[in-house]
Image (tube, rainbow, N blue to C red):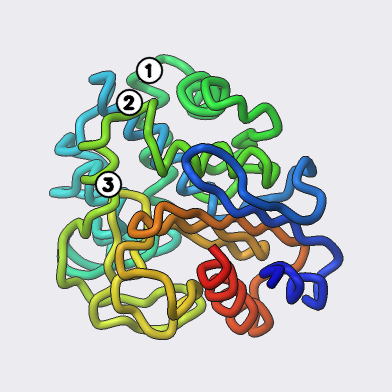
Amino acid sequence: MDPFVAVDQWPVGQAAVGVVRAKGVLMSRGPVERPFPLASVTKLLTAMAVLVAVEEGTVALDDEAGPEGATVAHLLAHASGLDMDGSRLGPPGRRRMYSNAGFDILGQLVAERAGMPFATYATEAVFAPLGMAATAITGSPAWEATASAADLCAFSRELLAPTLISDKTLATATTVAFPGLAGVLPGFGRQESNDWGLGFELRDHKTPHWTGSRNSPATFGHFGRTGTFLWVDPDVMLALVCLTDRDFGPWAAEAWPALSDDVLAAS
């Protein structure tokens, strides 16, 4: 069965989707070369650029950054104590508070250390090497990037079989950082274990969630307010990219898990 049949019935103007393995794209549908605004899927691109900077020695995960006592790792894992807009609501490592401001701080730190704008660093360190010509960070490293589904499929291949960073670094980034922290998963409510890696949201045993019931707990990725998502399930070595032109809402909370399950059933 074609897992994309349901996508044609979604209440969106356009949707571009792709199923990816490390060796290439298995199937795709829609305008995969069209750039879409990514919203918070931008954080995956930013996290990869920061991880490259870590391996280059430009920054370190334990470098102090953000509020007192916080580090680069705290900011990547939404555990710095900063809320969405940058207000400090508690000490680092106590709660999982989703923070755009934390990613802006990361971008500023890498830019200062590298001696170039963060968008330029991300292009040179990540996008150009992966052939992501339609991808650009146009503002905030937290939410202002545009990319095509084709580019994100190339990015997904990197997450399945890394070339820009080591396997060890990727494994660290996709393992729970500061485990046991409760918090709110945007769009899906409070989770007693709101597990996050270093920039990558982890499926683990969260419920409800934007991935499918067939996704393994090891699945990692992110979704964006502009109706976008990318997940990688390392247990089956498969990734799914989805970009749409309709903002996230109840339609997506219902449609995305169903699509994920259909893709996994067909693969």
Tell me which residue sits at (27%, 46%) in the image. 173
Residue on which the image places disc 1:
114
Q: Earlier in the sequence, mark 1 or mark 2?
A: 2
Q: Which disc is residue 27 wearing?
A: none
Q: Contact, CB < 8 Å: mark 1 with mark 2? A: yes
SS assignment at label 2: helix
Classify residue 63 as left or right of residue 11: left
**Residue type, mark 1 in image:** Ala
Disc 2 from disc 3: Cα separation: 13 Å
**Residue type, mark 2 in image:** Ala
Q: Which disc is residue 53 wearing?
A: 2
Residue 176 location, quadrant: bottom left
Residue on which the image places disc 3:
173
**Of all residues shown, which one is farthest toward the top?**
115
Judge the density around disc 3: few (<14), some (14-19), many (≥20) Cα neighbours within 10 Å. many
Measured along the vertical axis of the image, is residue 187 above or below residue 74? below
For this rendering, which residue is in front, 242 or 179? Answer: 242
Q: Quadrant of the N terminus?
A: bottom right
Q: Position of residue 228 (x, y in %)?
A: 63, 60
Tell me which residue sits at (46%, 81%) in the image. 188
SS assignment at label 3: helix
Residue 175 location, quadrant: bottom left
